[in-house]
Structure formats: C-alpha cells, structure tokens
Image (cartoon, rainbow, N blue to C red):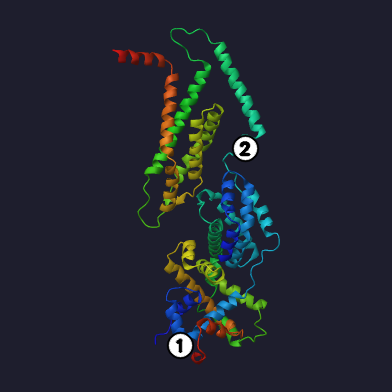
Amino acid sequence: MTRMVESVESAGGSDAAAVERTLAGDADAFRLLVERHSRSVFRLAHRMSGNQHDAEEIVQEAFLRAYRKLRQFESRANFGTWVYRIAANCAIDRLRRQRKEEMHLETELPQEEGPENGGLQKHADERPTPERTAMSAELRKKIEEALAGLSAAERAAFVMRHWEGLGIEEIAAVLRLKPSAAKNTVFRAVQKLRQALEPYAMGRGGTPQGRIAAALGAAPGTEQ
Amino acid sequence: MKHLNEEELVAYCGGDADGREAAAAHLHNCAACREELERIESVLALLKSLPEPDAGPAFEQRMWRQIAPRLPKRREWTWREWFAPRRLVAAGALAAVIFAAFLTGRLGRPKPTEVPALSAEQVRERVLLVAVGNHLDRSEIILVELSNAQPPAEKGALMNISAEQKRAADLIEENRLYRQTAQQQGDAVLASVLDELERALLDFAHSPDQVTPAQFEALRQRVEAHGLLFKVRIVGQDVREKEQELSPGSKQDSGGKKGRNKA
C-alpha cells in the first residue's frame, strides 16, 4: 500500500483530473489510470490468486468495475487505493467462485487432521538440508499449497497484511469486517500457514534469531 | 510470568501497535516466547522469500488493450461532441427546417378570426410542452421517492432499488431528446435542468441494484445537494403554464378571468 500511495503522490493531482475527464467521456483519460495503477493491482491479484492468468483477469475485472462505478468515486479519495480495494474484492469473489466449483473435490480432500497434514509432517520429518531448501520448485509448490489451503478472506487478509503492509483498519474496510474480525482472520491465516510450512521454514537454517534480538534490543545475557 | 499467546505473537509480527510495548518488554526477558516468535517469523520470512510477481514488460499497455474494448459506452455528451462538425451540420439543417416552418406558418397564416385557431407550429410546440411536462412529472416522482425512501433499520441490510432504477433508466433516453430540443430552441434554463436531471438519472440507474443504507444516503445527498427536485418542480410549472397559454380557448379563458376580476 505504501508503494501504491507513493506512486499516486508522485503523480500529483492528476488522478482526480483523469477521473473527471473519464466521466466527461474521454476514454483516453481512463487509459492513463489503467497504465498508472495496473501493475500494483497485478501484484496484489497475483499474490491472492497465485497465478498469472487469474491475476490478469482480476486486474481487468477490477478496472472494468471501477469504470462502471466511477461516479461513486469521491474525488477527494485516492483512486489507487480505491481500485486496489475493488481488485481485492474481485480476487475474493473469484477465489470463492473457484472454491465453489471445486467444492466436490474439496470435500474429498483431507482436512486439517487428515492424511495431507500427515504428508506434510512426513516431509517435516525429513528436515530438508539448507541446500535442498533453497527456493526449489518443490518448496514453492508447498507454499502455494499452503496458501491455497486458506479461505478467500484469510488469503486476502494475509496478503494485505504481510505482503502489502496494510493496516488492520484498511483490511477490515476491504473485507467489510470489524477490525477485531479482520485481525482474527489474519491470525487464522498465519496459524494455518505455520502449521503447513513451519518445518520447511525452520529447516532453512537462516533463523532470524539475530534479527529478532536486534529488533527487541535484547541484551546478550537474556539470550538463551 | 504469563507468556504471550500465539495471537499476540502474530499481532506483534504484523507490527500491531496494541500492547506492543508490553509484548516487547516480555519478549526481552522471556526466551520461550522469543523462540515461539522466531518460529512464526521464520514462516513469514519463508513466504516473503517468494519472488515478487512479475507482470512482464509492457504489461500496462497489454492490460489497456484488453480493457478498452470491454468498456461500456459513457452516455454523457461533452462540449467537444456538441460542437463536432457533424453535429453542427445536423443542428444547422434542423434549425433551417424549423425556421422555414416558422416563416411558412407566419406568412401563410390567415387573418385571425374571432376564435383564433392554433398554427401547426403552435400545435407542435404544445405537443412538445405536454410531453416535456409529463416527463418532468414522472422524473419528479422518482426524485421524491428517492428523497423520502427510508433505509432499512437492520444493520448490514441491503436496499433493493432495481425497480426504481429501471424507471430511471427508461427516462434517460427521453430526457436526452428533450434536452437536445431545448438546447436547439435556445431554452437555456430548461436545457440546463434537463442536463442535471440526466446526470442524476444516469447516476441512479448505474448504481448497484442493491445498496447499503450508506451508499443510498450518498446517492440521495448527491441529488439533494444541487436542489434538483426544486428545479424540476419550477421548470415543470413553467412548462405547464406555457402549455396552458397555447391551449385552444386559453385567450377566452384569460379574458373570462379578466372579466371576473373586473367584476
């Protein structure tokens, strides 16, 4: 979000002018808005959908929705933030649709205590060496699987919180939840990801102990 | 010593301000919680080590090429469009026809008899005034309904405004025709009110068909902010008065009124 805001700030007030011109029927002005914001929207969409094709579809859908609702856009607001929120909702809608379509498959898939977690545990027992745990295709697949195991709202909340750096209040606004519920959604997402990925994360060797200690300003004597 | 629970540690990782200082103080002194925090951080670090999604070169242009053909046509007219050569030619031709019809009507008009008949032009004008009057009446009803509607009291309930939207959408085309005619005839006041009305109708018709009370309130405020309902009423009244003046026998009526006043 910070990057997005910066990009808009650097563009000065021209987003508002482009919106006005679009409303007056100048389609080229909307092109300016697409070109200015589609990359940051893509980043969010990709992290939420996990693939290029869906991400591009979400970007297009978000801008089309924005165009149709442009009259509802308050000129004092930030267009980048507005379209970003629309994109987050498009991604959630898309994920939910896909989940529905795959519902029958999902019911056949093992749940949290099912054999799949056992499978992950098996991998965990193998404790990959640092060499093996460089971002291999297999590890990426595990991460994608873990992310796919989240609900649409959990994934959205996690991506916005930990990748995009949004505050709980902003996430709550996007998800139309109370801040406490948004916070809880982020927590559930982290909990699930932790369950699936911790063995791989701890096996990567480079534990962030030093970083944490530095961040906390821990005295050497307090370290175990 | 009470340890931090997982939720508190996750919130701490996310940089939440709530209880941050107390959590930091506890972590400073508690190796077990630091270890737990380290585990959570390592998972987040693993996730963050995924490469940033790459949209590829010329992504923005590619997206625009995909989006542009799917954009619905905007229905507003711009000044540029109004003064486009093809429109000026068409408007000029129409003005010439109206002027010719006016001259024909004037030159060919028989001497007034005791009961004056309306000219073809006056009949046309009256028909137009009746139609515009009806249109303004129907628009006024929608605006009144919009002003008086009560959003549902239940929290989170949505308002279904699809029926009203359909009626507003039906009025848009008609409104545009009357606005164009008013502009062509130089009736700036009527044209301006119809222009505002058209924007309000478009705004209303293109809103989601289910809105939250807050969205509905915003919609209503946009309409009320410009005093549109009042303007529509005034212009509607004006149109009806003009139409009355053109109605057959209106002169006799007015004469009768005068007579009554005198009496």
Q: Amino acid at mark 2?
A: Glu
Name which residue lies at 64% across and 51% down: A31
In this rendering, would A45 be left or right of B3? right
Q: Amino acid at mark 1?
A: Cys
Q: What is the C-alpha distance between the residues marked 1 and 2? A: 72 Å
Tag 2 residue? B81
Residue B159, above or below B88: below
Say which element carries label 1.
loop
Say which quarter of the image contains residue B251.
Answer: top left
First in residue order: circle 1 vs circle 2: 1
Q: Is residue A115 visible?
A: no
**Residue A50: which numbered mark, if any?**
none
Q: Is residue B83 visible?
A: yes
B209 or B219, which lies in front?
B219
Horizontal and vertical percent position of residue A73 = 51, 52
Residue A37, above or below A210: above
Horizontal and vertical percent position of residue B169 = 50, 40
In this rendering, would B167 be left or right of A42? left
Name which residue lies at 60% across and 59% down: A10
User: Which chain letter matches label 1?
Assistant: B
A81 or A111, which lies in front?
A81
Tag 1 residue? B30
